[in-house]
Amino acid sequence: MKCPNCGLEIPEGHMYCDSCGTEINFVPDFEPEVENEINATLSGVAEELNKEERLKKEKQEKKEAFLKNLLDKRAYFYVVICVVVLIIAGVFAYGFFNQGSSAKYLKAAENARNSGNLDTAIDYLTQGNAENPTNSDIIFRLSDYYLEKQDVEKAVGTLELITNSALFPEDKIVNAYESIISIYKENGMAAKITELFEGNEDPLVQQLKDKYIPHSPVMTPAGGSFDDSVSISVFMNDGSANRIYYTVNGQNPDADSILYENEIILDIEGEYTIKTVSVNDYGIASAVIENKYVIQRGKPRDPDIMEPSGEYNQNTMIVAVCDAGLTIFYTTDGSDPTMEEGIQYVSPITMPVGTSHFRFAAFDAEGNSSDIVDRDYHLVYTRLVSTEQAVNMLVNTLVRLDILLDTSGKVRGQEGHNEYIYTSDIEIEGAGEYYMVVENHVLNDGATIPTGLIYAVNTHDGTVNRLGYDSSGKYTLITISNR
């Protein structure tokens, strides 16, 4: 190795130049590949050092964030604790002072009552309730005092201050309801107990309802028609021992009705309506259960009516057929046919013109009736007359009867003339369809005066009639005569 200053060859192991005294630095000669490998190794070491530093920093930041969050939560917790303590203190203070106020009124009321001044005692409690509306002791005491005065309505109304409020705990509400029930029971007002729970879906009230209002009994079979007889069982399907009462006359049963002890047997022909209730130990009745039973012995077969209900446009005969030994009766006024009030069928019936309603039934010798068979008919003949022809037929008829002097509508002894105006189509019960035509008198100056007369012209054959009304307001035909 040569000295970098004077160029003298430096012996191996010497640290200074023997000639000029320059310090020798030994720097090994590296191959490029080795140098690159060293650089890469140093870069990796630096990156690992940086990564370790970064992780350390992130860990420190998370630690600081956790501590801050913990401190915030502790602060919030302490605030909540302080608020709760203040609320409890406020409630305690209110209850303390309120209790003192309530006790004052309760004591004053008790002294007044013991002195025979019940009205004064009630006044004290009324004032105490006004100042302490959530004190249940005052309300219960006030209700008791009203009961002493035999004022049931006010006693119940006072307890409703609790039942109708959301300011009282459940036990107080239950006590209030049970006190009301007791009042109603002692005063023979069981129906009021049922009304107490109507329309109230509150779960607490429903629990009380299940306790005090009995379930309805069950009847089996559940009504229907029977050919011979039927035995009816009535029971409670909830396992209760409630008493069951029933009626067979259509009236609602109560504790004074027939007590159910054995099956109800219906073996006489007829229709029966059986109503039952259960009554519990409080004297409260359940909802009424009602079933209908029909006992029919050898019911006659229904008659066969050959002409079905519907529209007809020509002359038609109504034919009815029944089993041998039976007799058919019918009505046309909508009433049920009977052997006493109905019309006996003996031969085919001419179908009435217009709308008609027939009811048929077959009867045996004992008077037993089949089911009723209904038929509705609408007979309208084909229209052969137009409205213009109807007006001409009316005018010609009036001329022929000497009501008019000529077809121009001249009237004897009157100036001007009559005119006839078609207004509408109408159907007259039992007679068919008609054109309605009104009569007006036209003066020479052109003024028109209604005469009040209305005519009806048959749409099928042109028959002319006056039109009127019967006592029920229905159209009726009046035969035309000379005036």
Image: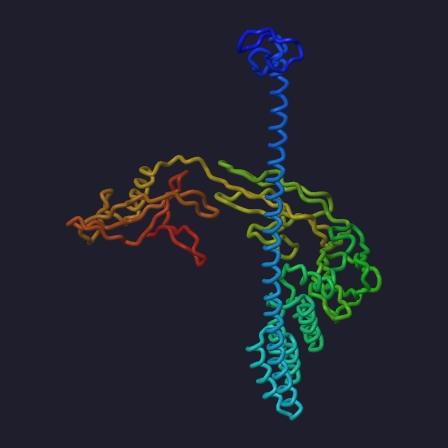
Q: Is residue 438 left or right of residue 374?
A: left
Q: Is residue 450 left or right of residue 426?
A: left
Position of residue 334 relative to residue 93, above or below, is above
Specify the farthest residue to the right.
262
Which quadrant does the C terminus fall into?
bottom left
Residue 60 in the image: state x and y as whole percent.
61, 39
Q: Quadrant of residue 266?
A: bottom right
Residue 29 in the image: state x and y as whole percent.
61, 9
Residue 137 in the image: state x and y as whole percent.
65, 77
Position of residue 24 relative to residue 413, above or below, is above
Name the residue at 65% across, 93% down: 115
Which quadrant does the N terminus fall into?
top right
Name the residue at 78% across, 50% down: 227
Residue 97 in the image: state x and y as whole percent.
60, 77
In this view of the protein, which residue sits in the foreground, 81 or 25?
25
Position of residue 156 relative to residue 169, above or below, is below
Specify the farthest residue to the bottom.
115
Name the residue at 69% across, 65% down: 252
Q: Is residue 17 visible?
A: yes
Name the residue at 36% across, 44% down: 424
In this view of the protein, which residue sits in the foreground, 27 or 200?
27
